[in-house]
Image (cartoon, rainbow, N blue to C red):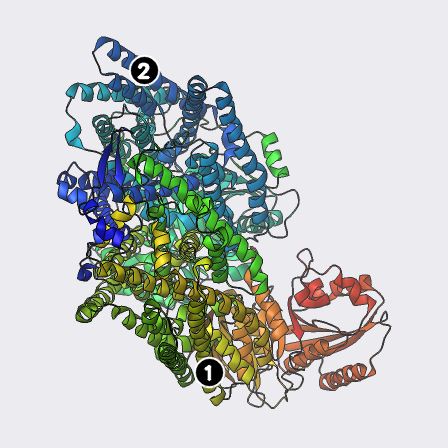
Amino acid sequence: MSQINNSSAQFQNPSRLRFDEEVGIHVVCQNVGMINSRGLWFHDDPLEYTLPLLLLQLSLISIITRSIDIFLKPLGQPSIVSHILGGVILGPSILGHNLAFMNKIFPREGRITLETLSVFGFMLFIFQIGVKIDPSIVWKSGKRALVVGILGFFIPFALASSIRLLLCHSISLDDTVCHVLQLVVLMQSVTAFPVIAIFLAEFKILNSDIGRLASSSSMICDICFWSFMSIIYVAHVAKEKSIQSAIGSILSVGFLVYLLLFGIRPAALWAIRNTPEGKPVKDAYIYVVFGALMGFGFLGEVIGINSLIASFLLGLVIPDGPPLGAAIVDRLDCFVSALLMPIFFTLCGLKTNVFSVQKWKTVGVIILVVFMGFLGKIIGTMLPPLFCRMPFRDALALGLLMNSKGIVELVLLNDWKTNSDSMTDECFAIMILSVLVLTAVISPLVKALYDPSRRFLAYRRRTICHHRSNEELRILACVLSQDNVRTIINLLDVSNHTNDKPIGIYVLHLIKLVGRASSLLIAHLPREKPSQNPTESERIFNAFKKFERENCSHVALHCCKSISPYESMHNDVCSVALENRISLIIIPFYKQSIDGKMVNSFHVFRHLNKSVLDNAPCSVGVLVDRGNLRKFLAEPLSCRIVVLFFGGADDREALAYAVRMSGNPHVSVTVLHFTMTSTSEGAEIAGGTARSKRLDSEILDEYKLNTEENERVSYLEEEVMDSGGVVAVIESIENAYDLVMVGKRHGESELMSSLGKWSEHIELGAVGEMLAVTDSNLRASVLVVQQQTRVWGLRDAEDSSLLRREKKDVAGVPNSNVYRNVDWDTMLDSEELKDANRNGTGQQDVRSSEKFQFACSIIVSTFCSENKNSKKYAQSPEHLISFSVVILHNFYAAFSNHSALTQYILTPLGESAFISMLLVGFFLGPSLWGDKHSFLSKVYSAKSINVSSTFAFFGCILYLFLLGIKMDLGMVKRAGRKAVVIGFFTFIFPITLNLIVAEILTTNMEMDQYLHDRVPYIAVFQSVTTFHVIVCLVTDLKLINSELGQLAISSSMISGTCSWSLAIFFLFIDRDETHDLIALILITAILLVMIIFFLLRPIMIWMTRKTSEGKQIKETYVTSIFIMLLGCAFLSEVFGHHVLFGAVTLGMAVPHGPPLGSDLVNKIESFVSSILLPSYFVFSVAGVNIFSIHLKTVTVVSIFGVSSFIGKVLGSMLPALYFKIPPSEAFSLGLVMSCQGVSDVLLIQHGRFLSVMTLFSSSPYSATEFYAYSAENNIFLLYLLQLLNTQIYSIMVINMLFLSGTFTPIIKLLYDPSKRYESCNKRTIQHTSLHMELRILACIYHQDSTPCIIRLLELTNPTAKTPMCCYAVHLVQLTGSLVPHLVHHEPGKSAKFHAKDSSHIINAFRLYEQECNGNVVVNLFTSISPFSTIHEEVCRLAAEKSTSLVIIPFHKQWRLHGIKNIVEARSVNRHILDMAPCSVGILVDRGTLSASKNNNLYEIGVLFAHGNDDREALAYGLRMAKHSKAALTVIHLIDLARTSQDYHEMELDSDIITEYKIESAGKRRHSYRQESVNDCVELIRLITSVENSFDLILVGRSYRSRSPLFEALTEWSEFPELGFMGDILTQLDSQCRVSVLVVQQQISGA
């Protein structure tokens, strides 16, 4: 320190910006290591520290750009305009023109971190673009797209180059301007696919004809541009350096591509193959991809290409779309688009200084070249479409689209500004402004010129009314999910398809576009070999193909699927309808009926319904499904249809459809014609012209004649006076019909106006909404029909409210609105389709194509060659940014990959991810490499230490924010007496013991003054217990649902609150002057908490309410929350609190769970956990140096570690033993409470930071001066921190690693949660007396299982003499929270936690309980837990409630439209079978139990061989046999192949068989027979012969005795959890259509 005092004059006013004469460039002097500020109260300027400065910069950028976007969005401007304008406002053109503002908010040294973050964000963005592109379609591009792309590059290039040469030779221009004009020519020639894709998505025309053509053409143009640039680059390298260098560059790129194609690509395909459909991609796969991204980015820099190219190439080799590509895009999209990419755009504006534009000649020549390039692009892209007879307006719109500029062009400009001396500030400002103006002008012009709906105008009628009876009726059925299939098939079935009246069915499966850059319309081709795990689309199409096979002579089926954004999905629907001359589109309503109530099942499709109705080129029917039509397929009885006829075109269309249906012999049709009473003079039931009323009369007269010939057709008239009369008539029909048909529009009339006064669903019309949405007793399905509206030449205004507007759109352009019959895309020939089929894809894109493109901004990275005489920490800003990006890649690649590898090795040993991160920190720190190893000087280079450490802290902010979201403060209130006592003693014992030890040591042991002063703080830090650490530990150990885990979590909330409060208090009193500031700091902390909970939390609750159930949170809301996070973290730093305080507090204020909390966690957790968090902890632990540790310090700190461990163990064990917890479990609880983790590292890191600040405050110089002196004298700050307190810090971290790493496997050995479920009593159905209450626990994964389980419970025969208690638990995956919940739904009380579908399940069981008249007691629960441990909750509940049977649904569910697979359920079922404290039944639901039998009997069969499980199955069957509607058949299998005999088992089998014979004697509905089998072939033949004779088959799971019969079956078992015969009955390729209950008798504790 004396050296600092003596040299104080050197740095009293350190200069940040200097000019190095030797190097010849401006350089920036950074104060290395100034990351966190102590706050204003300690006389620190937070803006001189990198982290608070970054937070303020990000906050300003986000607020200003978002505000501008709100104003410009209604004007049709894309977001890029808002972002650039935000940068211009913040930059030197407006606010930054004030030098004080610019130097304070955006100083030169502070901009390095911001720009590095923006480049890092662009790397992630370009990786996303690569993932979304399918490079295999490049060579399948259509000829027109190829011509447009090639001409769109070469014509503007030739025209702009000609003008440039003319200007340079005819006008005296500076050499720099001439060179810039070359760059302008290149930029005007390129059309980048990422830019076009973003614009098309914002314009919502991604899947329009223009959108598809623009996407394909931009890819071709991109390939031309980057091929041209690559040739120029190679030639430049060969000329400037050598041919060998050029060849080396080519070979290095080839080597990188080889690694990607033969390393990463096979690994990605393997990950996809190992991810079953419907199951999310494992987080481990995502982490590996992110690690590879960092590694290949660094490798690209090493071999001489830019990291952006390497990132893009890596994205290209990862298959696009679900599951892997979509998962990666979903995890990155929010973080990149909402936070990182706006920074990049804004920085372009920050570099733009309009005051630098001084020479109008320069402005003129650049604008002229830009205009000529613009004109050339228009000409090049318009000529081919005009030649193909595309309308002029559409061709012009395409030309404007191809002129769009965006992110790729901005990257090029930034690169040229950095690496080219010619790109002056003036030229750069002109180019940025030209991009801004072009984009701002093109956007509204394209919207005004191109309306994709115009092409859907038809020249002829496409309606059922105008359809000829002898022609094929073509119907387009839109399917949103498998739930729509059955109802649509039934509607088609009643549509009277005969040989004389055939129908053509076009099935379109609508799928959201995820993980891809372009929308697709794909024709379905069946696989050569059926898959055991078909996709959802295949299951849907298979159901329709079955319908086609059953009606093959008069039904033709065509299947395809649309993969598009929701906003423009209607374009595909309307395109298919127009091209295939469809007469009727059937689209499901976005709400579905569940238990008689309409719920928002598909809220995202409401916009789709409206758009199809507005734009369809034919008639449309909106189908409201209430389940009535589904019964018609199962039981082909009479389908009753009523048409509510008021008058108008739509009602006539509905009646025409009903007339066609009346030809079906199973259909009866009634027309209910509403008329006004004679007293209502002048009033009309519906509006309309005289012609319309005449048409109404004609169709009704024709229908009345039909009623005389067909007895199944009837006509009724109802006179009404007002809207109340209409409502009364509709309510009177109630359940008399299965389907109600009504028109959507009825013209303007007083009655209709009153009906639609409070209408919310305009897509259904006034009457349709009353039928479909209101809380009426109507249980019939509804079809709301709208007749075709978009037809040229309509006379009636009622037929098309849009007609006049459409005519105005095309005034003066006759016949130009509808494309001629031109094939825009080259159709794939049959050989290509066959190739795709052989490859197993089963599909081909018949409408569009997409190609890969080299969307890379920089061809080669430019490294800064450091001058030996220059200052070590002085670099040019641009070169320092480039260097920081390289080091950042190195930093993240090394840390993330090493962490992932270490965790992969240690996970089987029971170690947590925290231990892996600590170990990697040791491996990459001075403890392994030494103090001055060259490796450390490169990885922890002082040149990049600010950027790396700032990013690490920023990642920690995001992680702690997510932690706050997952925390549940309500646990403190809900903690029981046991948890409160244990938590308090766990806090008080270690702190008391440590303080006593501290007093003894400071009194009796000699130590240096620094260590003596630090002893109390070491004692406090070592005794801390943290809630988050305990939750993560029990989660890693899979104990989160166990009694020990739940108790540890609740106790840690109490002890953690107390210990952290004490630790923070000790941190505050570290300095003398802080005693006067404690009150002020506490006041500001309370003020910040109040702002968060009373201002920001209500806003977030409002966001939650505005987000409909099942719908993702809006990106605007996500951005707003990011702004809140940045602001709270910055205020924490300003007020002197730790920056993490605001992040955690805001996280706790976010409503946890869906939709807000879960979405935020899902969107950013993967990237934070795999990349940012490991870097923070590795960076923190890298400060540990074992070579600087002294023995005395080790002794002192280790004594505190041991004493705190003893205190925590005793504090946990003693209360636990008092509450009669077994000693082994009490000791395990003590070990869990003693573990340390992430939060403890944060605490001691903050204490370490304050220790350094104390040293600064004792010197006469500020922290800034001290850092400046360090930079001047070449002092490495990280090493300086180690000299100050590295001993204590290192020992505490080593103790943490040793204790946590040792305790984790010990806990796994000591505590086995399954032992708690062992029972000394027999809890089985066989051992439960008939007169005792039978207790059954029913588990439900999805509401579809509810009807089958309820019917099974009904057949269990609960009566007054044989009562039953049912515990129904809905199993829900835990998301967006750390702590699982078991919610008890008590009658009359509202539960705090709600899960999707829980309300429907609850209502169904409540109704069942009421119908049982007191014979059944139902207790309802919802378990919200991780599926990896949810079985423990089930077993614990079964043990506590003393249940005799646990019923769990099989993970595959058979439905009409295919098999629904709940993948996670299979693992849960297996664990329950292994651990259950009672008998278990796996219910395989094939729908036979769910169907109502009316007066028929339920046929139940029992396949009985021998053993405990078969006896349990038969005992259950005996209970069912007492039900009056159950017919039981027992088939006794005599195993002739059985060699060994267990006579005791045989006696038990004989006893229960005899009991059944006695029970069934004299009852005809019961039967018994014996069947002898010699081998497995005979057994399979026997099962096949009887399997479809029953509604339910009961079978045992396993057989203890060895038999060749069952051993042979085991070899081919597909589902071992079902046992031998259960597996046979459940084979996917079997013809069995019966439900199966596989029973396992209690094995735990038996």
Residue 1636 coordinates in the image, percent (x, y): 65, 68
Which residue is tagged 1? 1210
Local SS, label 2: helix
- Tell me the tag on residue 1619: none
Q: Amino acid at mark 2?
A: Ser
Q: Is residue 1195 left or right of residue 1065?
A: right
Residue 306 in view (yes/no): yes
Residue 936 position (above or below residue 1143) = above
Q: Are marks 2 and 1 in contact (CB under 8 Å)?
A: no
- Tell me the tag on residue 161: 2
Looking at this view, is 203 or 14 the one in front?
14
Residue 1109 coordinates in the image, percent (x, y): 37, 60
Q: Residue furthest top?
A: 170
Residue 647 coordinates in the image, percent (x, y): 31, 51
Local SS, label 1: helix
Residue 847 coordinates in the image, percent (x, y): 47, 34
Q: Amino acid at mark 1?
A: Leu
Looking at this view, is 642 or 1310 the one in front?
1310
